Amino acid sequence: MPTVVASSVAEKMIQRGGTGEVLLCFWRYRMEYKLNGVDKMSGITGSNEQQMEMAEYQELINRVRPKHNFLKNAILAFLVGGSICLIGQFILQIYTVQGLEQQQAQAATSATMVFLGAFLTGIGVYDRIGKFGGAGSIVPITGFANSIVAPAMEARREGFVFGIGAKMFTIAGPVLVYGFLISALIGISYFLLR
Amino acid sequence: MGQKVGRQSFRFNKPPVIAAAANIVGPMEGEGPLAAQFDWIMDDPLFGEPTWERAESKMLRESAKLALRKINWQPREIDFFLAGDLLNQIISANFAARGLDVPFLGLFGACSTFAEALMLGGMVIDGGFAARVLVASGSHHNTAERQFRFPIEQGVQRLPYAQWTVTGAGALALADQGGGPVITEGTAGKVVDLGISDVNNMGAAMAPAAADTLISHFQDLGRSPAEYDLILTGDLGTVGSAALKDLMKMQGYLLEGNYCDCGMLIYDLARQDVHAGGSGCGCSSVVFTGSIWKQLNEGRYRKVLLAATGALMSSTSSQQGETIPGIAHAVVVESPNLA
């Protein structure tokens, strides 16, 4: 029973544009960041002297390596992410005007955005948007579509079962697993605290 | 027969000759500053093959054949073919050798493979085990991205210090006699790890190994950096090169005007959006076979020290949080006019 509750709660939250979606996005972004291997600093073993040397070397590298331009990245992410949301809003309006109920219109909008993300990945455009927009194009649902279609495209050459079927979720998989886990936890808390 | 000098270095008795050099590069390398030096620039990264992996293998095979054609050697005259690449189980080199019908020794030294092959090829010849040896190494941007990082169409931002794997393969034909630049000395590298675990910062992971090999080279042979016309590292990129210079300086060796890195030569860093420069097995092999070998042959360089660097991790070891060990092998190649 709790899982049913969990998924329905998550659904409600997503419909309200609430924390569920935000959490999912956060996890997705976090996982991709992790996969990128950025913030790992482990495996250091050996004597104190070696550790000192390693720490000193890390300092040297931090000094010589080019820095992110956080402001520029944030502004670009805001503009690209904002534009994608604007397009989503526009599509939502069209569906609403065409007579769909709000809930149906929202679902249809999500599906359309996923299609657009997948299509742009397929024709080789989404990776360029991603290079430019960073988190702005990873976080929206179009980025989720990109992270499924991109590995699927490459795995095509390994066949349909162990290629596409198995490798499609190499990047999106962790997002789904922890997304479901969190929604289950929220569902249980909701069930107990109600 | 050659002799060992010091802890890690050696000197050839009868220096093996590099009789011919050939290379094939991808479209992006063909737009770089060294475009005019390459033998064959592919129009399409797939090279007429169904997969990138096959394209990489074909580049290796064709570059090896091209080196043979340039000096009219037949594959049956080759005693050994030494080659390697970056892919799991070095499939590109194995599959390239499948089509050549030559005794084959597969090598893995990550991006240092080219110098490793050159060093071992020279040893095999000077040791009297062979008269003619073919060495090659190559890499492909798309296969490396797939294996080590993200799918090509994934919309991620590359970090400002990430490097771009070179699409290209280079081959050299070595002989016990004849005309051409000669390999005179070399230094085999040790595996060195200063605790870098960021797979986007290969230059930083490899720089300590490069420094270790270069310093051992200078100490073993009683040299100074100034005695070379050119000291060339394989693929440290801008970050690794800066780190190497710092590390060398701490030990009292100055790398200045005669130092360069293949990863910084192959692309126009300002224009080509490759961040910290090129990397991969193909990086040092196409730069050396394209530009450096010719300049040595024409006598514009008299003495070059090539120290190719490799990062010895796998995607599994990185995911398990292991740090990235580096290695560097150095070979001295001299102009034919000197020897």
Image (cartoon, coloured by chain):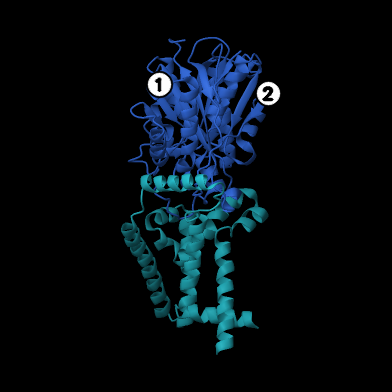
Chain colours: A cyan, B blue
Locate residue A173, reporting x and y percent.
Answer: 58, 62
- Seen in the picture, residue A147 relative to B212 is either above or below; the reply is below
The mark that comes first in sequence, 1 or 2, is 2
Locate residue A79, reporting x and y percent.
Answer: 33, 63
Locate residue B164, reporting x and y percent.
Answer: 45, 42
Given residues B26 and B43, the one toward you in this image is: B26
Which residue occupies 50% across, 10% down?
Answer: B179
Which residue occupies 44% across, 54% down?
Answer: A127
Q: Nearer the viewer, mark 1 or mark 2?
A: 1
- Seen in the picture, residue B258 relative to A172 is either above or below; the reply is above
Residue corresponding to mark 2: B103
- Look at label 1 and name its amino acid: Tyr
Mark 1 and mark 2, same subunit? yes
- Which mark is drawn over residue A83? none
- Look at label 2 and name its amino acid: Pro
Which residue occupies 57% across, 26% down?
Answer: B117
Q: Chain of mark 2?
A: B
Quarter of the image where the N terminus of chain B is located: top right
Q: Secondary structure at mark 1?
A: loop
- Which mark is drawn over residue B228? 1
Q: CA distance from mark 1 to mark 2?
A: 35 Å
